[in-house]
Image (tube, rainbow, N blue to C red):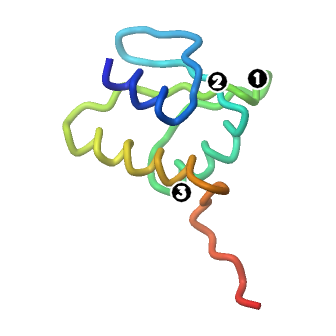
Amino acid sequence: VRLDQLFAASRFEIIGATPLFRLTSHVRAQPIAVALGHRGIHVRRFTEHPEWIRFGLPGAEAAWLRLERALAAATSEGIDTGISAPSP
């Protein structure tokens, strides 16, 4: 339930679920996956369905907090890839 609420708040659609994984869909899935990877959150992407991302269920509370922060940053205005834009 907690993971589902996190995805709903981040505008992901849950399209598949098991006790350990959630398969989600998001229009910006690819850049979000890259941004999560820059933050050490590893997800499964699908070449044949670029709008899909599969997430594993976090374990300890620290992992939940890390996922929550990383997902919030990755889905906020413009995708934050962890790479700074050059100064003008």
The residue that appears at 45% across and 45% down in the rendered structure is: 41
Residue under label 1 = 49
Q: Quadrant of the C terminus?
A: bottom right
User: Where in the figure is residue 13, as x and y percent of width and height?
Assistant: 59, 20
Residue under label 2 = 25
The residue that appears at 41% across and 21% down in the rendered structure is: 4
Q: How many marks?
A: 3
Assess disc 1: are there few (<14), some (14-19) or many (≥20) residues with their C-alpha within 10 Å of its C-alpha.
Answer: few
Residue under label 3 = 38
Q: Earlier in the sequence, mark 1 or mark 3?
A: 3
Front of the two marks 2 and 3: 2
Determine whether label 1 and label 2 are within 8 Å by CB. yes
User: Where in the figure is residue 20, as x and y percent of width and height?
Assistant: 37, 16
Front of the two marks 1 and 2: 2
Q: Earlier in the sequence, mark 2 or mark 3?
A: 2
The residue that appears at 39% across and 25% down in the rendered structure is: 5
Q: Is residue 64 above or below residue 4?
A: below
Q: Earlier in the sequence, mark 1 or mark 2?
A: 2
| Three-letter code, disc 1 | His
Assess disc 3: are there few (<14), some (14-19) or many (≥20) residues with their C-alpha within 10 Å of its C-alpha.
Answer: some
